[in-house]
Image (cartoon, rainbow, N blue to C red):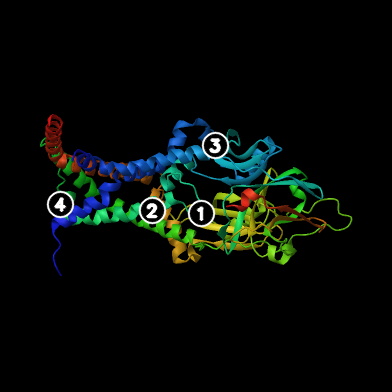
Protein backbone atom coordinates (compact mmCIF):
# COMPACT_ATOMS: atom_id res chain seq x y z
CA UNK A 1 0.00 0.00 0.00
CA UNK A 2 2.79 2.41 0.99
CA UNK A 3 4.65 1.66 -2.21
CA UNK A 4 1.56 2.30 -4.32
CA UNK A 5 1.16 5.74 -2.70
CA UNK A 6 4.83 6.42 -3.34
CA UNK A 7 4.29 5.44 -6.97
CA UNK A 8 1.21 7.66 -7.31
CA UNK A 9 3.04 10.58 -5.77
CA UNK A 10 6.18 10.34 -7.83
CA UNK A 11 5.26 8.63 -11.09
CA UNK A 12 5.16 11.93 -12.99
CA UNK A 13 8.74 12.69 -12.05
CA UNK A 14 10.16 9.62 -13.78
CA UNK A 15 10.56 11.28 -17.19
CA UNK A 16 13.15 13.50 -15.52
CA UNK A 17 15.50 10.51 -15.35
CA UNK A 18 16.02 10.87 -19.11
CA UNK A 19 17.77 14.15 -18.33
CA UNK A 20 20.72 12.24 -16.87
CA UNK A 21 21.56 11.09 -20.39
CA UNK A 22 22.49 14.52 -21.85
CA UNK A 23 25.17 14.80 -19.17
CA UNK A 24 26.49 11.34 -20.04
CA UNK A 25 26.53 12.20 -23.75
CA UNK A 26 28.17 15.57 -23.06
CA UNK A 27 30.95 13.81 -21.17
CA UNK A 28 31.35 11.30 -24.00
CA UNK A 29 31.55 14.03 -26.63
CA UNK A 30 34.12 15.98 -24.62
CA UNK A 31 36.33 12.93 -24.14
CA UNK A 32 36.07 10.99 -27.42
CA UNK A 33 37.96 7.75 -27.89
CA UNK A 34 38.74 6.02 -31.17
CA UNK A 35 39.97 2.56 -32.08
CA UNK A 36 43.71 2.27 -32.73
CA UNK A 37 45.04 3.30 -36.13
CA UNK A 38 46.10 0.51 -38.48
CA UNK A 39 49.78 0.16 -39.48
CA UNK A 40 50.90 2.81 -41.94
CA UNK A 41 51.76 1.98 -45.53
CA UNK A 42 53.62 3.84 -48.26
CA UNK A 43 51.82 4.88 -51.49
CA UNK A 44 54.32 6.85 -53.56
CA UNK A 45 55.16 9.97 -51.58
CA UNK A 46 52.32 9.32 -49.10
CA UNK A 47 52.60 7.27 -45.93
CA UNK A 48 49.10 6.67 -44.59
CA UNK A 49 47.69 5.11 -41.41
CA UNK A 50 43.89 4.57 -41.54
CA UNK A 51 41.94 4.87 -38.32
CA UNK A 52 38.32 3.65 -38.15
CA UNK A 53 36.15 6.17 -36.29
CA UNK A 54 34.32 3.35 -34.50
CA UNK A 55 33.96 -0.41 -34.40
CA UNK A 56 30.33 -0.40 -35.53
CA UNK A 57 28.95 -2.14 -38.61
CA UNK A 58 28.74 -0.15 -41.88
CA UNK A 59 25.77 2.21 -42.24
CA UNK A 60 23.73 3.18 -45.28
CA UNK A 61 24.26 6.59 -46.83
CA UNK A 62 22.86 7.59 -50.21
CA UNK A 63 22.47 4.16 -51.79
CA UNK A 64 25.82 2.85 -50.49
CA UNK A 65 26.89 1.21 -47.28
CA UNK A 66 29.85 3.13 -45.87
CA UNK A 67 32.30 2.94 -42.98
CA UNK A 68 34.06 6.07 -41.75
CA UNK A 69 37.82 6.43 -41.43
CA UNK A 70 40.31 9.14 -40.68
CA UNK A 71 43.44 8.84 -42.80
CA UNK A 72 46.53 10.01 -40.98
CA UNK A 73 49.12 11.25 -43.46
CA UNK A 74 52.47 10.56 -41.80
CA UNK A 75 54.26 11.62 -44.99
CA UNK A 76 53.21 13.43 -48.14
CA UNK A 77 51.29 16.59 -48.96
CA UNK A 78 47.56 16.15 -49.55
CA UNK A 79 47.76 19.08 -52.00
CA UNK A 80 49.50 16.58 -54.31
CA UNK A 81 46.32 14.48 -54.56
CA UNK A 82 44.19 15.09 -57.66
CA UNK A 83 41.57 12.63 -56.48
CA UNK A 84 41.53 9.95 -53.82
CA UNK A 85 39.02 7.27 -52.80
CA UNK A 86 38.59 4.39 -50.36
CA UNK A 87 36.46 1.27 -50.46
CA UNK A 88 36.20 -1.96 -48.51
CA UNK A 89 35.82 -5.24 -50.36
CA UNK A 90 37.77 -8.06 -51.97
CA UNK A 91 39.37 -5.60 -54.40
CA UNK A 92 39.75 -1.89 -55.10
CA UNK A 93 36.70 -0.56 -56.94
CA UNK A 94 37.32 0.57 -60.52
CA UNK A 95 37.66 4.29 -61.13
CA UNK A 96 34.27 4.50 -62.93
CA UNK A 97 32.50 3.17 -59.83
CA UNK A 98 34.48 5.38 -57.44
CA UNK A 99 33.81 8.54 -59.43
CA UNK A 100 30.02 8.16 -59.55
CA UNK A 101 29.19 9.77 -56.19
CA UNK A 102 30.53 11.55 -53.16
CA UNK A 103 30.81 8.44 -50.99
CA UNK A 104 34.36 7.13 -50.84
CA UNK A 105 36.03 10.46 -51.68
CA UNK A 106 38.97 11.58 -49.53
CA UNK A 107 38.10 14.99 -48.14
CA UNK A 108 39.01 17.40 -45.36
CA UNK A 109 42.02 19.61 -44.96
CA UNK A 110 45.77 19.31 -45.11
CA UNK A 111 45.70 18.48 -41.39
CA UNK A 112 43.35 15.53 -41.64
CA UNK A 113 41.58 13.55 -44.31
CA UNK A 114 38.29 11.75 -43.78
CA UNK A 115 36.57 9.19 -45.93
CA UNK A 116 33.22 7.40 -45.94
CA UNK A 117 34.68 4.21 -47.44
CA UNK A 118 32.20 2.42 -49.70
CA UNK A 119 31.52 -1.10 -48.50
CA UNK A 120 28.91 -3.85 -48.35
CA UNK A 121 26.28 -4.20 -45.64
CA UNK A 122 28.55 -6.61 -43.74
CA UNK A 123 32.30 -6.87 -43.59
CA UNK A 124 33.80 -10.22 -44.61
CA UNK A 125 37.08 -11.83 -43.55
CA UNK A 126 38.24 -11.67 -47.18
CA UNK A 127 37.66 -7.89 -47.32
CA UNK A 128 40.36 -5.26 -47.23
CA UNK A 129 40.39 -1.50 -47.05
CA UNK A 130 41.60 -0.11 -50.37
CA UNK A 131 42.88 3.44 -50.65
CA UNK A 132 43.31 4.64 -54.26
CA UNK A 133 45.04 7.95 -54.89
CA UNK A 134 45.68 9.71 -58.20
CA UNK A 135 48.40 12.34 -58.25
CA UNK A 136 48.46 15.36 -60.56
CA UNK A 137 50.56 13.44 -63.12
CA UNK A 138 47.68 10.97 -63.48
CA UNK A 139 49.49 8.13 -61.74
CA UNK A 140 47.23 5.80 -59.67
CA UNK A 141 48.55 4.49 -56.35
CA UNK A 142 46.62 1.77 -54.55
CA UNK A 143 47.21 0.28 -51.12
CA UNK A 144 45.49 -2.50 -49.19
CA UNK A 145 44.87 -3.07 -45.49
CA UNK A 146 43.32 -6.40 -44.38
CA UNK A 147 40.36 -5.79 -42.06
CA UNK A 148 41.41 -6.55 -38.46
CA UNK A 149 39.47 -9.10 -36.42
CA UNK A 150 38.21 -6.43 -33.98
CA UNK A 151 36.39 -4.64 -36.80
CA UNK A 152 35.02 -7.85 -38.33
CA UNK A 153 33.23 -9.04 -35.20
CA UNK A 154 30.85 -6.07 -35.21
CA UNK B 1 -22.27 10.71 -32.31
CA UNK B 2 -21.94 10.12 -28.59
CA UNK B 3 -20.94 13.18 -26.62
CA UNK B 4 -17.57 12.82 -24.91
CA UNK B 5 -17.67 14.02 -21.33
CA UNK B 6 -15.69 16.99 -20.10
CA UNK B 7 -14.12 14.69 -17.54
CA UNK B 8 -12.68 12.55 -20.35
CA UNK B 9 -11.09 15.58 -22.03
CA UNK B 10 -9.71 16.71 -18.70
CA UNK B 11 -8.22 13.26 -18.06
CA UNK B 12 -6.81 13.20 -21.58
CA UNK B 13 -5.26 16.63 -21.00
CA UNK B 14 -3.46 15.15 -18.00
CA UNK B 15 -2.47 11.94 -19.77
CA UNK B 16 -0.75 13.74 -22.62
CA UNK B 17 1.09 16.25 -20.46
CA UNK B 18 1.69 15.02 -16.92
CA UNK B 19 3.90 11.97 -17.60
CA UNK B 20 6.46 14.04 -19.47
CA UNK B 21 6.19 17.36 -17.67
CA UNK B 22 9.79 17.48 -16.38
CA UNK B 23 11.26 16.54 -19.76
CA UNK B 24 8.91 18.95 -21.52
CA UNK B 25 9.83 21.79 -19.15
CA UNK B 26 13.51 21.13 -19.74
CA UNK B 27 13.08 21.15 -23.52
CA UNK B 28 11.04 24.38 -23.31
CA UNK B 29 13.60 26.04 -21.03
CA UNK B 30 16.59 25.06 -23.16
CA UNK B 31 14.74 26.27 -26.27
CA UNK B 32 13.93 29.53 -24.50
CA UNK B 33 17.60 30.08 -23.68
CA UNK B 34 18.60 28.97 -27.20
CA UNK B 35 16.42 31.75 -28.67
CA UNK B 36 18.66 34.33 -27.03
CA UNK B 37 21.89 32.32 -27.27
CA UNK B 38 23.47 34.84 -29.65
CA UNK B 39 22.59 37.73 -27.36
CA UNK B 40 23.76 35.87 -24.26
CA UNK B 41 27.05 35.19 -26.04
CA UNK B 42 27.33 38.90 -26.80
CA UNK B 43 26.57 39.71 -23.18
CA UNK B 44 28.98 37.24 -21.59
CA UNK B 45 31.90 37.22 -24.03
CA UNK B 46 33.38 40.60 -25.04
CA UNK B 47 35.54 38.80 -27.67
CA UNK B 48 32.34 37.80 -29.50
CA UNK B 49 31.17 41.43 -29.86
CA UNK B 50 31.63 43.17 -33.20
CA UNK B 51 32.26 46.60 -31.79
CA UNK B 52 32.46 49.32 -34.39
CA UNK B 53 33.31 52.66 -32.78
CA UNK B 54 34.47 54.23 -36.04
CA UNK B 55 31.32 53.29 -37.99
CA UNK B 56 33.31 51.26 -40.51
CA UNK B 57 31.56 49.21 -43.17
CA UNK B 58 31.64 45.42 -42.73
CA UNK B 59 34.47 43.74 -44.61
CA UNK B 60 33.47 40.89 -46.95
CA UNK B 61 33.90 37.37 -45.67
CA UNK B 62 36.71 36.51 -48.14
CA UNK B 63 38.79 39.33 -46.66
CA UNK B 64 38.21 37.99 -43.15
CA UNK B 65 39.37 34.55 -44.28
CA UNK B 66 42.61 36.11 -45.52
CA UNK B 67 43.11 37.72 -42.11
CA UNK B 68 43.09 34.25 -40.52
CA UNK B 69 45.36 32.79 -43.21
CA UNK B 70 47.83 35.60 -42.62
CA UNK B 71 47.78 35.23 -38.84
CA UNK B 72 48.06 31.43 -38.99
CA UNK B 73 50.18 30.64 -42.08
CA UNK B 74 50.01 26.90 -41.43
CA UNK B 75 46.22 26.89 -41.07
CA UNK B 76 43.67 25.86 -43.67
CA UNK B 77 40.49 27.91 -43.67
CA UNK B 78 37.44 25.72 -44.23
CA UNK B 79 34.55 28.16 -44.18
CA UNK B 80 32.85 31.10 -42.52
CA UNK B 81 29.67 31.99 -40.69
CA UNK B 82 28.17 35.46 -40.57
CA UNK B 83 25.82 35.96 -37.65
CA UNK B 84 24.03 39.07 -36.39
CA UNK B 85 25.74 42.41 -37.18
CA UNK B 86 26.63 42.86 -33.49
CA UNK B 87 28.46 39.52 -33.36
CA UNK B 88 31.84 38.72 -34.90
CA UNK B 89 32.16 36.56 -37.97
CA UNK B 90 33.23 32.97 -37.28
CA UNK B 91 35.95 31.69 -39.58
CA UNK B 92 36.42 27.93 -39.29
CA UNK B 93 39.85 26.45 -39.86
CA UNK B 94 42.16 23.55 -39.06
CA UNK B 95 45.78 23.75 -37.97
CA UNK B 96 48.52 21.32 -37.02
CA UNK B 97 47.45 21.50 -33.36
CA UNK B 98 43.78 22.31 -33.98
CA UNK B 99 41.55 19.68 -35.63
CA UNK B 100 38.71 22.24 -35.66
CA UNK B 101 38.89 25.86 -34.61
CA UNK B 102 36.82 28.99 -34.97
CA UNK B 103 38.43 32.41 -35.28
CA UNK B 104 36.18 35.21 -34.03
CA UNK B 105 37.00 38.00 -36.49
CA UNK B 106 35.54 41.49 -36.10
CA UNK B 107 34.15 42.24 -39.54
CA UNK B 108 34.56 46.00 -39.07
CA UNK B 109 38.13 46.16 -37.76
CA UNK B 110 39.44 42.90 -39.24
CA UNK B 111 40.86 41.92 -35.86
CA UNK B 112 40.94 38.32 -34.63
CA UNK B 113 39.39 38.61 -31.16
CA UNK B 114 39.41 34.97 -30.05
CA UNK B 115 40.25 31.46 -31.17
CA UNK B 116 37.62 28.98 -30.02
CA UNK B 117 38.59 25.32 -30.21
CA UNK B 118 35.56 23.76 -28.57
CA UNK B 119 31.83 23.81 -28.51
CA UNK B 120 30.26 27.27 -28.61
CA UNK B 121 27.45 28.26 -26.24
CA UNK B 122 25.17 28.80 -29.26
CA UNK B 123 25.93 25.33 -30.64
CA UNK B 124 25.65 23.72 -27.21
CA UNK B 125 22.24 25.25 -26.46
CA UNK B 126 20.84 24.35 -29.89
CA UNK B 127 22.10 20.77 -29.59
CA UNK B 128 20.83 20.41 -26.02
CA UNK B 129 17.41 21.72 -27.01
CA UNK B 130 17.26 19.96 -30.39
CA UNK B 131 18.35 16.43 -29.46
CA UNK B 132 19.39 16.52 -25.78
CA UNK B 133 22.94 15.75 -26.96
CA UNK B 134 21.95 12.17 -27.87
CA UNK B 135 24.52 10.99 -30.43
CA UNK B 136 23.72 10.89 -34.14
CA UNK B 137 24.08 7.55 -35.87
CA UNK B 138 23.31 6.65 -39.48
CA UNK B 139 21.30 9.83 -40.02
CA UNK B 140 19.18 9.78 -36.87
CA UNK B 141 19.34 10.60 -33.18
CA UNK B 142 16.97 9.07 -30.63
CA UNK B 143 17.06 12.41 -28.79
CA UNK B 144 15.94 14.30 -31.89
CA UNK B 145 12.93 11.97 -32.21
CA UNK B 146 12.23 12.34 -28.50
CA UNK B 147 12.20 16.13 -28.69
CA UNK B 148 10.19 16.29 -31.94
CA UNK B 149 7.58 13.88 -30.63
CA UNK B 150 6.83 16.41 -27.87
CA UNK B 151 5.13 18.43 -30.62
CA UNK B 152 2.37 15.80 -30.83
CA UNK B 153 1.80 15.90 -27.07
CA UNK B 154 1.92 19.70 -27.03
CA UNK B 155 -0.70 19.89 -29.79
CA UNK B 156 -2.87 17.38 -27.93
CA UNK B 157 -2.46 19.41 -24.72
CA UNK B 158 -3.52 22.57 -26.51
CA UNK B 159 -6.61 21.01 -28.10
CA UNK B 160 -7.77 19.18 -24.97
CA UNK B 161 -7.02 22.22 -22.80
CA UNK B 162 -9.18 24.44 -24.97
CA UNK B 163 -12.00 21.89 -24.99
CA UNK B 164 -11.91 21.63 -21.19
CA UNK B 165 -11.69 25.40 -20.68
CA UNK B 166 -15.12 26.41 -21.92
CA UNK B 167 -15.38 29.91 -23.38
CA UNK B 168 -11.62 30.35 -23.12
CA UNK B 169 -11.74 33.42 -25.35
CA UNK B 170 -13.13 35.43 -22.42
CA UNK B 171 -9.56 35.37 -21.08
CA UNK B 172 -8.61 37.75 -23.87
CA UNK B 173 -11.20 40.35 -22.90
CA UNK B 174 -11.49 39.76 -19.17
CA UNK B 175 -8.30 38.11 -17.96
CA UNK B 176 -8.78 36.54 -14.54
CA UNK B 177 -5.96 36.09 -12.04
CA UNK B 178 -7.20 35.71 -8.47
CA UNK B 179 -4.27 36.26 -6.15
CA UNK B 180 -6.03 36.04 -2.78
CA UNK B 181 -8.20 32.95 -3.03
CA UNK B 182 -5.65 30.29 -2.27
CA UNK B 183 -2.86 28.49 -4.05
CA UNK B 184 -5.20 26.20 -6.04
CA UNK B 185 -7.15 29.08 -7.52
CA UNK B 186 -4.03 31.08 -8.30
CA UNK B 187 -2.35 28.15 -10.07
CA UNK B 188 -5.50 27.35 -12.01
CA UNK B 189 -5.95 30.95 -13.14
CA UNK B 190 -2.29 31.27 -14.04
CA UNK B 191 -2.32 28.02 -16.03
CA UNK B 192 -5.47 28.95 -17.94
CA UNK B 193 -4.46 32.54 -18.57
CA UNK B 194 -0.99 31.52 -19.80
CA UNK B 195 -2.50 28.86 -22.01
CA UNK B 196 -5.02 31.12 -23.68
CA UNK B 197 -2.56 33.93 -24.32
CA UNK B 198 -0.03 31.40 -25.65
CA UNK B 199 -2.37 29.65 -28.08
CA UNK B 200 -0.59 31.18 -31.09
CA UNK B 201 2.82 30.32 -29.65
CA UNK B 202 1.92 26.72 -28.72
CA UNK B 203 0.42 26.25 -32.18
CA UNK B 204 3.60 27.53 -33.87
CA UNK B 205 5.84 25.37 -31.65
CA UNK B 206 3.67 22.29 -32.25
CA UNK B 207 3.48 22.73 -36.01
CA UNK B 208 7.17 23.51 -36.48
CA UNK B 209 7.96 20.63 -34.11
CA UNK B 210 5.83 18.31 -36.25
CA UNK B 211 7.75 19.51 -39.28
CA UNK B 212 11.03 18.68 -37.52
CA UNK B 213 9.63 15.20 -36.87
CA UNK B 214 8.84 14.77 -40.58
CA UNK B 215 12.33 16.03 -41.40
CA UNK B 216 13.86 13.50 -38.99
CA UNK B 217 12.01 10.67 -40.72
CA UNK B 218 13.29 11.89 -44.09
CA UNK B 219 16.88 12.04 -42.81
CA UNK B 220 16.54 8.58 -41.29
CA UNK B 221 15.15 7.21 -44.55
CA UNK B 222 18.03 8.83 -46.48
CA UNK B 223 15.63 10.99 -48.52
CA UNK B 224 17.01 14.40 -49.44
CA UNK B 225 14.57 17.31 -49.28
CA UNK B 226 17.19 19.45 -50.96
CA UNK B 227 19.34 17.67 -53.49
CA UNK B 228 23.07 17.52 -52.86
CA UNK B 229 25.31 19.71 -54.97
CA UNK B 230 26.77 17.72 -57.86
CA UNK B 231 30.40 16.62 -57.83
CA UNK B 232 32.70 18.17 -60.39
CA UNK B 233 33.31 15.80 -63.30
CA UNK B 234 36.81 14.31 -62.96
CA UNK B 235 37.63 15.45 -66.54
CA UNK B 236 37.21 19.09 -65.47
CA UNK B 237 40.03 18.76 -62.95
CA UNK B 238 43.23 19.27 -64.98
CA UNK B 239 46.27 17.00 -65.00
CA UNK B 240 49.85 18.25 -64.90
CA UNK B 241 51.37 18.30 -68.34
CA UNK B 242 54.98 17.41 -69.09
CA UNK B 243 57.13 20.39 -68.20
CA UNK B 244 54.65 21.86 -65.73
CA UNK B 245 56.32 22.93 -62.53
CA UNK B 246 53.31 24.25 -60.64
CA UNK B 247 50.38 22.27 -59.33
CA UNK B 248 47.08 23.11 -61.03
CA UNK B 249 44.99 25.48 -58.96
CA UNK B 250 41.39 26.70 -59.15
CA UNK B 251 40.70 29.19 -61.94
CA UNK B 252 37.99 30.90 -59.91
CA UNK B 253 38.88 32.35 -56.53
CA UNK B 254 36.47 32.43 -53.61
CA UNK B 255 36.20 36.21 -54.04
CA UNK B 256 35.08 35.67 -57.63
CA UNK B 257 32.63 32.98 -56.48
CA UNK B 258 31.10 35.48 -54.03
CA UNK B 259 30.75 37.99 -56.82
CA UNK B 260 29.09 35.35 -59.07
CA UNK B 261 26.63 34.64 -56.25
CA UNK B 262 25.81 38.36 -56.00
CA UNK B 263 25.27 38.52 -59.74
CA UNK B 264 22.83 35.61 -59.54
CA UNK B 265 21.01 36.87 -56.43
CA UNK B 266 21.55 40.63 -55.99
CA UNK B 267 20.23 40.61 -52.40
CA UNK B 268 22.44 37.67 -51.39
CA UNK B 269 24.01 38.08 -47.94
CA UNK B 270 26.34 35.16 -47.18
CA UNK B 271 25.72 33.52 -43.83
CA UNK B 272 27.47 30.16 -44.22
CA UNK B 273 30.14 29.46 -46.81
CA UNK B 274 32.40 26.45 -47.31
CA UNK B 275 35.52 26.13 -49.39
CA UNK B 276 36.13 22.91 -51.39
CA UNK B 277 37.24 19.95 -49.27
CA UNK B 278 38.79 18.11 -52.22
CA UNK B 279 39.54 18.78 -55.89
CA UNK B 280 36.10 17.65 -57.13
CA UNK B 281 34.26 19.72 -54.53
CA UNK B 282 32.73 23.17 -55.13
CA UNK B 283 32.38 26.45 -53.29
CA UNK B 284 29.18 26.13 -51.29
CA UNK B 285 27.52 29.41 -50.38
CA UNK B 286 24.34 29.84 -48.34
CA UNK B 287 22.80 33.12 -47.42
CA UNK B 288 19.72 35.19 -46.91
CA UNK B 289 17.92 37.63 -49.13
CA UNK B 290 15.00 39.97 -48.73
CA UNK B 291 12.45 37.35 -47.57
CA UNK B 292 11.83 37.79 -43.84
CA UNK B 293 9.99 34.50 -43.35
CA UNK B 294 12.86 32.43 -44.72
CA UNK B 295 15.95 31.39 -42.79
CA UNK B 296 19.50 32.62 -43.38
CA UNK B 297 20.23 29.67 -45.69
CA UNK B 298 17.34 30.14 -48.10
CA UNK B 299 19.61 31.16 -50.96
CA UNK B 300 22.27 28.61 -51.79
CA UNK B 301 24.72 28.12 -54.61
CA UNK B 302 27.40 25.61 -55.55
CA UNK B 303 30.05 27.11 -57.80
CA UNK B 304 32.65 25.10 -59.71
CA UNK B 305 36.12 26.51 -58.86
CA UNK B 306 37.64 25.18 -62.10
CA UNK B 307 35.07 26.61 -64.54
CA UNK B 308 33.11 29.24 -62.59
CA UNK B 309 29.88 27.45 -63.50
CA UNK B 310 27.03 27.81 -61.00
CA UNK B 311 26.27 24.10 -60.79
CA UNK B 312 23.22 24.48 -58.56
CA UNK B 313 21.28 27.39 -57.12
CA UNK B 314 18.15 27.51 -54.98
CA UNK B 315 16.13 30.46 -53.77
CA UNK B 316 12.66 30.94 -52.27
CA UNK B 317 11.31 31.50 -55.80
CA UNK B 318 12.34 28.05 -57.00
CA UNK B 319 11.75 25.99 -53.85
CA UNK B 320 9.40 23.03 -53.69
CA UNK B 321 6.76 22.96 -50.93
CA UNK B 322 8.93 20.75 -48.71
CA UNK B 323 11.96 22.99 -49.20
CA UNK B 324 9.86 26.03 -48.30
CA UNK B 325 8.73 24.35 -45.07
CA UNK B 326 12.35 23.52 -44.33
CA UNK B 327 13.42 27.15 -44.69
CA UNK B 328 10.55 28.82 -42.85
CA UNK B 329 10.48 26.45 -39.86
CA UNK B 330 13.50 27.86 -38.01
CA UNK B 331 12.56 31.56 -38.12
CA UNK B 332 9.11 30.61 -36.81
CA UNK B 333 10.43 28.22 -34.17
CA UNK B 334 13.21 30.50 -32.91
CA UNK B 335 11.47 33.81 -33.52
CA UNK B 336 14.33 35.22 -35.59
CA UNK B 337 12.07 36.63 -38.29
CA UNK B 338 11.90 40.14 -36.84
CA UNK B 339 15.32 40.41 -35.19
CA UNK B 340 15.87 41.04 -31.51
CA UNK B 341 12.29 42.13 -30.77
CA UNK B 342 10.65 38.94 -31.99
CA UNK B 343 13.36 36.95 -30.25
CA UNK B 344 12.43 38.67 -26.98
CA UNK B 345 8.73 37.88 -27.55
CA UNK B 346 9.60 34.24 -28.23
CA UNK B 347 11.82 34.19 -25.12
CA UNK B 348 8.95 35.50 -22.97
CA UNK B 349 6.43 33.00 -24.30
CA UNK B 350 9.04 30.25 -23.97
CA UNK B 351 9.17 31.01 -20.26
CA UNK B 352 5.37 31.06 -20.09
CA UNK B 353 5.18 27.65 -21.79
CA UNK B 354 7.82 26.19 -19.45
CA UNK B 355 5.88 27.62 -16.52
CA UNK B 356 2.64 26.05 -17.75
CA UNK B 357 4.00 22.55 -17.43
CA UNK B 358 5.19 23.38 -13.92
CA UNK B 359 1.87 24.96 -12.86
CA UNK B 360 0.05 22.02 -14.46
CA UNK B 361 2.01 19.56 -12.33
CA UNK B 362 1.56 21.68 -9.21
CA UNK B 363 -2.20 21.71 -9.80
CA UNK B 364 -2.18 17.92 -10.08
CA UNK B 365 -0.14 17.72 -6.88
CA UNK B 366 -2.46 20.00 -4.91
CA UNK B 367 -5.52 18.20 -6.22
CA UNK B 368 -4.18 14.91 -4.80
CA UNK B 369 -2.46 16.17 -1.68
CA UNK B 370 -5.32 15.33 0.65
CA UNK B 371 -5.74 11.88 -0.85
CA UNK B 372 -2.00 11.20 -0.44
CA UNK B 373 -2.05 12.38 3.15
CA UNK B 374 -5.07 10.25 4.02
CA UNK B 375 -3.58 7.21 2.34
CA UNK B 376 -0.24 7.70 4.08
CA UNK B 377 -1.94 8.00 7.47
CA UNK B 378 -3.85 4.80 6.81
CA UNK B 379 -0.65 3.07 5.76
CA UNK B 380 1.13 4.20 8.87
CA UNK B 381 -1.68 2.87 11.05
CA UNK B 382 -1.68 -0.40 9.11
CA UNK B 383 2.07 -0.70 9.46
CA UNK B 384 1.90 -0.02 13.17
CA UNK B 385 -0.82 -2.62 13.66
CA UNK B 386 1.25 -5.07 11.63
CA UNK B 387 4.31 -4.49 13.81
CA UNK B 388 2.50 -4.98 17.14
CA UNK B 389 0.94 -8.26 16.08
Q: Are marks 1 and 3 on the same chain?
A: no
Residue B119 in view in this figure: no
> Which labelled disc corresponds to residue B170?
4
Cα–Cα span, label 2 and label 1 = 22 Å
Q: Please say if the residues under marks 4 and 1 sit with CB atoms less than 8 Å apart.
A: no
Residue occupied by mark 3: A31
Cα–Cα span, label 4 and label 3 = 54 Å
Name the secondary structure under disc 4: helix
Does B292 sit above or below residue B182? below
Categorize mark 2 by other alpha carbons within 10 Å: few (<14), some (14-19), many (20+). Answer: many
Q: Quadrant of the C terminus of chain B?
A: top left
Q: Chain of mark 1?
A: B
Describe residue B58's horizontal placement relative to residue A126 as left or right. left
Q: Quadrant of residue B237?
A: bottom right
Name the secondary structure under disc 3: loop
> Which labelled disc corresponds to residue B297?
1
Residue occupied by mark 2: B148
Q: Nearer the viewer, mark 4 or mark 3?
A: 3
Sequence-wise first label, 4 or 1: 4
Q: Please say if the residues under marks 3 and 2 sit with CB atoms less than 8 Å apart.
A: no
Q: Chain of mark 4?
A: B
Sequence-wise first label, 2 or 1: 2
Q: Chain of mark 3?
A: A
Q: Chain of mark 2?
A: B
Amino acid sequence: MASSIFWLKHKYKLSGLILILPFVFLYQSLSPSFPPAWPSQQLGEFKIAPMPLDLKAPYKHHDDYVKDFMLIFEQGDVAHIRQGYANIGPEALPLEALQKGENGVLHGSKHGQHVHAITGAKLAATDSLWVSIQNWQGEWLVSQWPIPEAVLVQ
Amino acid sequence: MAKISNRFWFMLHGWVSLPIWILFSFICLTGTVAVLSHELTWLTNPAARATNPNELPAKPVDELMLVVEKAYPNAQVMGAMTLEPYLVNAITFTDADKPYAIAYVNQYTGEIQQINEGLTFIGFMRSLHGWLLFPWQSGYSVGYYLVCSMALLMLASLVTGLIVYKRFWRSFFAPKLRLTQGKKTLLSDLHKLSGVWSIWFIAIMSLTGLWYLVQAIFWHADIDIESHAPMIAAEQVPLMQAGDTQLPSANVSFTEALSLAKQRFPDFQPSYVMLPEHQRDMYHLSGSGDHIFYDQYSYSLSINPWTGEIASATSPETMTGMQTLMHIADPLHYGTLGGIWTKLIWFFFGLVLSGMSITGFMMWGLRHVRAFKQAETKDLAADMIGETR
